[in-house]
Image: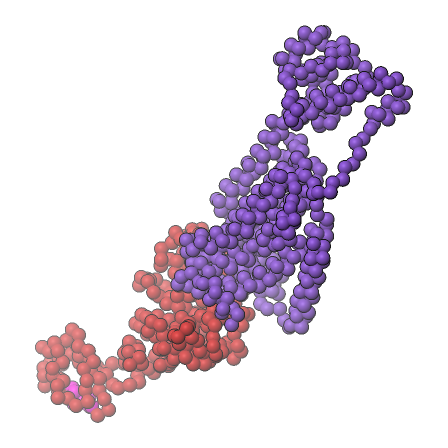
Amino acid sequence: MKAVAVLAVLAVAVVLRRWLRRRRRAGGPAPAGRGLGPFTSDVWLVAAREMRERFRGRMFKVGTVLILAVVAAAIVIPTLTSGALAPRRVGIVGTLPASGRASVEAAARSVGTTAILSAEAGTGEAAAALRSGRIDLAIVDGRELLVDKAFGSTDTSPSARFVRAASSGLGLAEAVEAAHLSSAQSSALAGARPLPVSSLQSGRLSGPSRATSVIGLILTFVMLSQYNTWILIGVMEEKASRVIEVLLAAVRPIRLLAGKVLGIGLVAFAQASLIVAFALAVAGWTGSDLLRGTAPLVVVATLVWLVLGYAFYCWVYAAAGSLAERQDQVQSLALPLSLPIIFGYIMAITVAASGSASAFFDVLAYLPPTAPFAMPVLVALGTVSWWQFVASAAISLACTVGVARLAGGIYRRAILHTGGRVKLREVLGRTAG
Amino acid sequence: MLELDGLRCRFGTVTALDDLSFSVPAGQVVGFLGPNGAGKTTAMRAVFGLTDLAAGTVRWNGAPVGQAERRRFGYMPEERGLYPGMLVGEQVEYLGRLHGLGASAAHEASGLWLDRLGLVGRVGDKVEALSHGNQQRVQLAAALVHGPELLLLDEPLAGLDPAGIDAIGDVLVEQARLGCCVLFSSHQLDQVEDLCESVTIIDHGRVMVAGRVDDLAASGPRRLVVRVEGHRDAGWTRGLGGVAVSEVSGGRARLVLDASADSDTVLRAAMAAGRVTEFAFERRRLSEVFREALG
């Protein structure tokens, strides 16, 4: 795999070098529309129109609000139902030594909260307080723990984990006391840390990384599907309304197409950034653990691959749009194009849910059609190094350049061809000729 | 001056342009005529690089036309093309900017042309909310907004009411007076005759006739219009050598005289038939030039 990645990077370098050399050789004055600066060139004008019209559209506004609502719900609801943040209320019957109190507080910290200790007059009062929900746990004479309802052995809720941790800690404290250890020995035992564990097989996703990864996959899937469909329909509508002839009288086809995909891409990135910023704000506000551990890295990887995925697919959809002239033709073209997206998404969701990736999935992370879904999951699993990430991105960029060139040729040939759906074979034949 | 030189284009087995060559001088409105399928639209699209040519060159002021030149041209295609959901003012402004205008210049020119074409109250409407005629005016505004040096208009008068035809006709003549090169195609030959100083008639992708309208009208055999009281047909012309009846309508006989015929002989024959209420030489009409050119 490493050798393949190195070869891919070398191939990209060779292609870039040849391209730069050809540009240097071509020399001469810049064509019209290029010398006007980045923000007044025809490409930017086309992009700006796309952005203005999309931002104004009701579909965009309603869609954004809906996505934000779903993201907020996905972050807030688990936080509300987990109860992890509520301080654990512990009733003490009799006495509890300082080491015991420290053990209870450490147990609370281990589930991300604090412990509030209160004295109870007797076991009967403590039981009543447990039943009424005033306290979560009662400790009788430092030797017995009392809860309202028993926790199952598979229960991983914060309440169950807290009680188990308190139970272990108190047991240890009692054992230390019984062993008559010195204070230094007691402190050494209390400060014991678990040894790191290395694995031979790929890792499993932790809770926060898994949730972030799944939300990222859904976002990537929704945005790639939505914005590529916009390109497909947008190109088809320009052809169907015949405005294309007026536009091409002033702008070269490839620059018109570049402006279109740039404009829609910027709208997509703006929406994705808004969603991520909103998610970060909500997660911070609610104290959600969605951004703990490797989750921030997963967010960055998702955004990078959203851009790379859009860059790869947008040309394909634009070329397909130029073949169509009616809505029903668009639908029949969109279906086969969406298959690799759906395949990549399902594979990635499956791996994110199971927490382990196969060798086949590793390969998918290097194929441009499926990499936008597979690579962020591998990042979440922690099974890719930076150079593998960069190699996959380089392969995707190199393929995007090739796809863009081919799509540009198809677009140029097909966009002015009216009178029914254009056959791809016919256009490719003419492009070759 | 626009020059089309030896343009050749084929679509499958159909020859759309067959060594087509003609020129359009600056400061003139030139009519581009021909039957359906003659190659008019293909020739216009070739000027904008929208058709792949097998051979030939399009030149502007002696130099081959490139993208920089095209940005200074205005085009109104036969198949009207506008964004249906875009606002009228923004649309014209946007197309002006694509043709190289700055933001404020495009805004100003857009308002000016929409005002001039009677759309001042519709600037904030979507194009799809306008009538066919008004959409056509927006399309013309889009072709004019950047002050083009060359205007190519494919059937700009089709589907317009008389007021619309007059409005667009006035603009075309005005643009030509300002030094613009104007070429437009139409099937409405009466309007073409009124608006154009020159015409080019093509068929099967070849030029059949080209020249000034006055010269074409004055060329060919002499024509007489004669009305004789009491004669609804042109029976009194029977026996006159070298005289052919072109058309009879409302008691008026349109006669075509060949070189051997003498108008005095025709007048005498008419007076012999009855009281002559009309006797006049007539120019050849453009429709007749068109029909004769196409055989």
Q: Nearer the viewer, residue B267 or B6?
A: B6
Image quadrant for the C terminus of chain B?
bottom left
What secondary structure prevails in the magenta region? helix
In the image, which lettered chain appears purple?
A
User: Closer to the camera, A223 or A259?
Assistant: A223
Q: Position of residue A104 (x, y in %)?
A: 75, 20
Q: Which residues are magenta?
A: B261-267
> Hey, which residue is sitting farthest bottom in the picture?
B260
The x, y position of residue A368, in whole percent, is: 61, 54
Viewer-closest of B109 and A264: A264
Chain identifier matching the red colour in the rendered picture: B
| Residue A404 at x, y percent in the picture | 57, 61
Q: Is residue B190 left or right of residue A217?
A: left
* In the rendered image, the vertical position of residue B223 relative to residue A370, given as above or below: below
Asked if A234 appears above or below A114 in the picture, the reply is: below
Tell me the residue at 73%/14% (across/down): A144
Scheme of colours in the image: by chain
